[in-house]
Image (cartoon, helix red, strand yellow):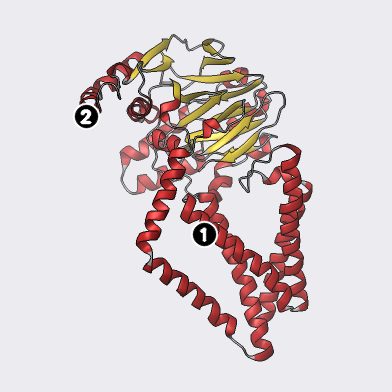
Amino acid sequence: MQSVLRYLSGFVGLFFLALGLMFLFLPGSQTAQFALLPSGNAGLSTMRGDMAGLFLGMGLFSLLGAIRGSLRFLAIPASFLGFIILGRLFNLMLDGRSSTGEQSVLIEIALAAVLLLTIVSLRKGRNGSTTGAVAVPMLILIAVACAWIFQRPLGLLLFQRTVDRALQNQLLNTLPDGLHAGLCGSGSPLADPTRSGPCVFVVAGKHLYIVDTGDGAARKLALMGLPPARIDAIFLTHFHSDHIAGLGDIFIQRWGGGSYQDPVPVYGPQGVETVVQGFNQAYSLDKEYRVAHHGAATLPPSGNGGIARPFTITEASDVSQVILQEDGVTVTAFAVNHAPVFPAVGYRVDYKGRSIVISGDTAPSPALTKYGRGVDVLFHEGLQTTMVSRMQDTLARANRTTAAKIMHDIPSYHTTPEDAARIAQQAGVRQLVFYHIIPALPLAYLDAAFLGDAPKIFSGPITVGRDGTMISLTPGNTTVTMRELL
């Protein structure tokens, strides 16, 4: 058993050494994985110095400890991991949960457990002592007991910290000038525990725009430090329910947080008037209640809801319209193929020489290749037919014929990851980000199955988007920086 643990500790050492070398020679490749955003040469120096030094040191001592059976050498990386885990737990208590942070702490606990078990095994083998085996569980029990005894004051402290962080976190005030875009909803109508309905936010300069308003979009925006009160305009790609379900929430949250005198502009192809009018009517009683409760000075009645800004689009793939130009921002709409749904559009946003394209829902469409030519990032919907086909088979066996028929139909007006990769390759985009993910992918482990052969087709970076995925494009260069906000 001791030999096995020493081998495992050796693998831990090799793992740390590999991370250290990556930070030393390829620091840029580690930014997304470690949720880092280095600032210029100073940031790269920190990554190559501090981060590489930490991991190389931990790796060296782990490897030497495993080879020589040295308790002292193994205790050094184990101690560092203990402090790192302690910091993670403090972050969990003070700053809230995040999927990335939770995955990291689980990995770090597993690595620390290997080193500690090796230390205990070596110590027991030398003198029969089981002090380490007893001490670690005792420390854990003491920590749990303290957390339980002081649950109320600690709970109030954590609540206050969470409130302060949530209400003071204004991402718009911290972003550098440039074009930033991300996912306030990366899912589809299919239930996904990790994804809200389709929604893309765009920050161009100090303007905040929203493309589609899937269910849960308003809450995700607030969690990311992008309060709906700051929204300048909404753009709808088409009028399927999953793309407009959160429109009422956006209307209320923007109005309630900003004391606006005018409703939010909602741009969309012909038919958007019906959608906006319907939501305004549905929320008309809610409007009366809130004005009566808070007063017209706080919630001006004229600022409630939305106002439609329709444009007319034809089905031709070579037709486009510039629908918004302000402060250096240009938004262009173009027709996509979501038949029998019509109208359906995608959007291109240009700002200070940087650009993105958002596909909306579409089958493989030449318009995406044309209007995506040379853009920095293409946000494209994705449906994995192999996975959907298996869902169809399961539903058919369960005699859920209606749901099985829908699973049979939906691939015809969506795009596979492979086809989206071909479009991205032909258009020469720098990075491809998938959203409107079908089917649900609750685990990142499923990403490879979802992508299929897409990485073989597109030569650039591919990201399976999640709620909170954001890219940043600063003027004057071609860099695409990615980070996770949730």
The quadrant the N terminus occupies is bottom right
Q: Earlier in the sequence, mark 1 or mark 2?
A: 1
Q: Is residue 476 left or right of residue 341?
A: right
- Looking at the picture, how far across and down is residue 238, in whole percent? 42, 21
Displayed quadrant of residue 353: top right
Q: How many marks?
A: 2
Q: Is residue 229 left or right of residue 381?
A: left
Quick one: 462 or 340, which is closer to the camera? 462
Residue underneath mark 1: 89
SS class of the residue under badge 1? helix
On screen, residue 140 above or below 367: below
**What residue is rendered at 57% in x and 56% in y?**
104
Quick one: 456 or 126, which is closer to the camera? 126
Quick one: 338 or 109, which is closer to the camera? 109
- Looking at the picture, how far across and down is residue 204, in whole percent? 56, 23
- Looking at the picture, how far across and down is residue 108, in whole percent? 60, 62
Q: Is residue 461 visible?
A: yes
Residue underneath mark 2: 293
**What residue is rendered at 38% in x and 36% in y?**
216
SS class of the residue under badge 2? helix
Displayed quadrant of residue 375: top right
CB within 8 Å, label 1 to label 2: no
Q: Residues within 10 Å of mark 2 (few under 14, many from 20)?
A: few
**What residue is rendered at 58% in x and 29% in y?**
180
Displayed quadrant of residue 453: top right
- Looking at the picture, how far across and down is residue 241, in whole percent? 35, 28
Q: Is residue 22 visible?
A: no
Q: Which three-letter amino acid code belongs to the residue tagged 2?
A: His
